[in-house]
């Protein structure tokens, strides 16, 4: 999939990324094929109620000795040919409700495939959101490091002025130049990290090249207030999730499917009744009648009712029924396991979100304190009352706290979006 120039000229929203990934993702396409195969299976089951129709033509050539036509006991070598044709049709009148249960089973199989497709789309949307948020985080980290790089460049000029005025020794100028180099290195590292995150996102979208790819930066004014509604108690989210999540509905359909398979297996206990119709005619090369006349004279029709009553089949039906019952129990256990796992995942997501919220609020306070401390240190350094070591240490603490805040911010957003995901809400920024 080539990355066209038109793609490189736009900024992608999260929803556009999800839509594009859904359209081009291989797993989604495979799930779509499974859905189509399930539709074919349902169509086949429904058509099994129709009568079949079979035509056959046969040719028999006989060689050997036969009695003379005049009845004498002498034999002569003869060659004769017989051509026959027939048209036959049959329909099942009763097969222990097997056909109706097969149709219902295939309907459930189609619903199972549809939920599998929905689950794949849900999982992909969440995966895209993870990489999208990572790009946003790396963009903001890069912005912070660029600001610090600009600030350290200005401080080199200021330190040069202080040195020229005799207020600081020359060594502090070299220390500031060294700090500026470190800040430049941080910018390069952050840019490389951003490029890697963009590559990860474009690969999820199945875009061949990340060149020129860019995303829309959403307007997130208040992280806490905009996501507070997402942080709901686990039991509330679970009550919604259990009714709508595809993974649960898949397991429920599988239980119903195995129940229909039991009825299909039990159908072998019942008598089988079918109706057959047929018509046929033949042509004999030794006859003096014409081909048309022979077909007319030899034509025969038949109709028959066939009743098959099972008596003993070496316990095959009984064992099939036992196996089907075990499959029902297994599918019920699978459903219960899916529900338990879902509740545990929601619980974990909830406590992760609560923890992320607390961390975000604490890092906000840390940044506020670091900004005040750095402002004081910068003012003291400007008048020569603070060393370059104190200045760099204060700046490093500020950068670290800003980085922690950004990480906490996007971690909190991501945790909130996971809860939205379990609640059946679209992932939006």
Image (spheres, rainbow, N blue to C red):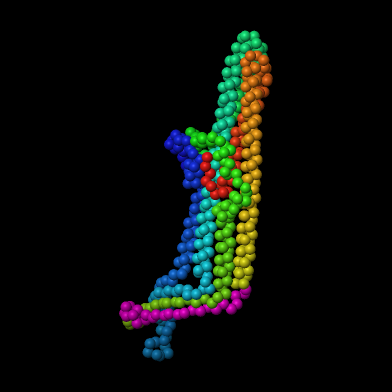
Q: Is residue 380 left or right of residue 243?
A: right
Q: Which residue occupies the extreme top position in the image?
A: 165
How far across and how far down the image is residue 334, in percent?
62, 58
Residue 315 lies in the magenta stretch: yes
Q: Nearer the viewer, residue 283 or 342?
A: 342
Q: Residue at x 62, y 51 (%)?
A: 235
Is any atom of residue 284 visible in this view? no
Is any atom of residue 51 visible in this view? yes
Residue 202 lies in the magenta stretch: no
How far across and how far down the image is residue 329, in percent?
63, 63
Which of the 4 image quadrants contains residue 152? top right
Q: Residue at x 43, y 74 (%)?
A: 89
Q: Nearer the viewer, residue 382 or 34?
A: 382
Q: Residue at x 65, y 38 (%)?
A: 358
- For the image, the number of numbered tags is 0
Over which residues does the magenta segment extend? Answer: 290-316
How far across and how far down the image is residue 111, in percent?
52, 58
Relative vertical location of residue 266 with respect to residue 64 in this rendering, above or below: above
Q: Nearer the viewer, residue 156 or 343?
A: 343
Q: Residue at x 56, y 47 (%)?
A: 421
How far across and how far down the image is residue 355, in percent?
65, 40
Relative vertical location of residue 10 with respect to residue 172 in this rendering, above or below: below
């Amino acid at each position: 999939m080539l990355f066209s120039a038109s793609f490189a000229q736009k900024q992608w929203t999260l929803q556009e990324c999800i839509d594009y990934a859904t359209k081009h993702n291989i797993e989604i396409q495979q799930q779509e094929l499974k859905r189509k195969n399930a539709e074919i299976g349902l169509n086949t089951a429904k058509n099994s109620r129709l009568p079949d129709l079979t035509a056959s033509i046969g040719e028999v050539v006989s060689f050997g000795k036969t009695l003379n036509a005049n009845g004498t006991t002498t034999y002569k070598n003869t060659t004769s040919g017989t051509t026959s044709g027939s048209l036959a049709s049959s329909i099942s009148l009763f097969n222990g409700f097997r056909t109706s249960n097969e149709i219902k089973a295939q309907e459930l199989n189609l619903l199972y495939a549809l939920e599998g497709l929905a689950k794949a789309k849900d999982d992909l949307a969440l995966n895209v959101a993870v990489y999208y948020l990572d790009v946003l985080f790396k963009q903001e980290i890069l912005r912070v490091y660029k600001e610090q790089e600009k600030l350290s460049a200005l401080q080199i000029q200021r330190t040069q002025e202080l040195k020229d005025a005799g207020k600081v020794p020359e060594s502090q100028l070299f220390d500031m130049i060294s700090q500026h180099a470190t800040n430049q290195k941080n910018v390069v590292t952050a840019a490389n990290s951003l490029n890697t995150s963009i590559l990860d996102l474009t690969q999820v979208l199945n875009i061949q090249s990340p060149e020129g790819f860019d995303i829309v930066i959403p307007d997130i004014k208040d992280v806490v207030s905009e996501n507070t509604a997402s942080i709901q108690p686990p039991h509330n989210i679970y009550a919604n999730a259990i009714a709508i999540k595809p993974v649960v509905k898949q397991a429920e359909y599988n239980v119903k499917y195995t129940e229909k398979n039991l009825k299909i297996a039990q159908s072998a206990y019942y008598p089988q009744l079918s109706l057959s119709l047929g018509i046929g005619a033949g042509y004999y090369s030794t006859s003096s009648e014409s081909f048309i006349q022979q077909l007319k004279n030899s034509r025969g029709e038949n109709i028959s009712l066939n009743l098959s009553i099972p008596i003993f089949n070496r316990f095959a039906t009984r064992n099939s029924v036992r196996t089907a019952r075990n499959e029902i129990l297994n599918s019920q256990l699978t459903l219960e396991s899916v529900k338990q796992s879902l509740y545990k995942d929601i619980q974990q997501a909830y406590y992760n979100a609560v923890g992320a919220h607390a961390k975000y609020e604490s890092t906000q306070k840390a940044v506020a304190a670091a900004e005040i401390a750095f402002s004081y240190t910068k003012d003291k350094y400007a008048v020569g009352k603070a060393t370059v070591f104190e200045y760099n240490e204060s700046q490093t603490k500020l950068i670290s706290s800003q980085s922690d805040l950004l990480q906490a911010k996007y971690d909190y957003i991501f945790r909130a979006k996971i809860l939205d995901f379990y609640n059946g809400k679209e992932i939006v920024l």
